[in-house]
Image (spheres, grey):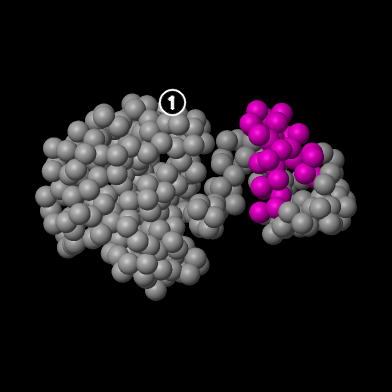
Amino acid sequence: MTGRGGPGGPPVDPAATRRAALREAGAYLAAAGIADAEREARFLLLGLLGLEPRDLALAGDRPLGPEGAATLAPALARRAAGEPVARILGQWEFWGLPFALVPETLVPRPDTETVVEAALAALPARDAPLRLLDLGTGSGCLLVALLSELPAATGLGIDRSFAALAAARHNAAANGVGERAAFACGDWCDALRGPFDLVVSNPPYIRAAVIPGLDREVAAHDPHAALDGGEDGLDAYRPILTQLGTGGILASGATAVVEIGYDQAEAVSALGCRAGLGPGRLARDLAGHPRAITFQR
């Protein structure tokens, strides 16, 4: 790249065309060791400059301009240093819907869509007036995705972080389900009154000792509280499943779906059974890894 760059970023030429800037950005990220560098450079250029793919196809020869160069340069430096694209953009897509992010929320991942798929598959009808509960809602991605598919449903999202709850409220409103979603600060099912027809959760499930060795994008940028599952990774499942099995949270015959780590299916299923929930049904993600367990009461 030639010309002057933004503070802390690579030099980006304001006179470069959008297509040329995209090529140079991809090469810069590849040299920094970023996997799938061209795709990530495209995400950054389109997202930060407010462009659509058609803008590259139809107006790719338009100069980047001083403002575009000043915006792109520091973003490339942040990505080269290991910050995820979603954190730089401040939003990400889940279930085909946009979600704003804050430091206190996880970046929604495609694997977590397995929870939505399993929950929908367990429901006898999508037009019923269901009551949903999302434990550890974070950005609200699970609850909002489900409400987008269940037009007569209402939902409650619980989280311990006020910042996460504010983001979840924003995301529910932005995706057209705000009037059917409520959010409250709490610790799993404590002080909740049921019954709910469907409960979903993506709790922290990574063993504490493993977290420092995770990819830097996760270990350095995802909220620790949303990752740390304690010594064996099961700390959150114990109160959640116990309360779902005995606390009157789940209606009779209702469904609970929890996300799990790839090696936790047996342990989480056993916890659910001991709590009085029906035998768990395992769902796998697109890579074939165990990703969600469906329980019924």
Residue 134 visible, this angle: no
Q: Does the magenta stretch include residue 129?
A: no
Q: Which of 123 and 31 is in front in this view?
A: 123
Q: Position of residue 104 (x, y in %)?
A: 41, 50
Residue 253 visible, this angle: yes
Residue that carries the numbered disc 1 in the rendered image:
213
| x 18%, y 62%: residue | 194
Q: In which quarter of the image is residue 11?
A: top right
> From which residue to which does the magenta span run?
21-47
Q: Which of 23 and 53 is in front in this view?
A: 53
Q: Position of residue 132 (x, y in %)?
A: 30, 61
Q: Nearer the viewer, residue 74 or 296?
A: 296
Q: In this view, does 211 lie to the left or right of 53?
A: left
Disc 1 crowd rating (10 Å Cα; few below 14, some 14-19, many 20+) is: few
Q: In this view, does 70 lie to the left or right of 19?
A: left
Q: Which of 127 and 215 is in front in this view?
A: 127
Q: What element carries label 1?
A: helix
Q: Position of residue 225 (x, y in %)?
A: 34, 43
| x 28%, y 56%: residue | 198
Q: Main secondary structure of the magenta part?
A: helix
| x 66%, y 34%: residue | 36
Q: Where is residue 40 in the image (x, y as percent from the top left)?
A: 66, 41
Q: Is residue 33 magenta?
A: yes
| x 45%, y 47%: residue | 113
Considering every residue shown, the one lying at the far front of the view is 124
Going by the numbered disc 1, the residue's amino acid type is Gly
- Quarter that holds the N terminus: top right
Q: Quadrant of residue 85?
A: top right
Q: Quadrant of residue 161?
A: bottom left
Please, is residue 275 above or below residue 270 in the view? below
Please, is residue 42 above or below residue 181 in the view? above
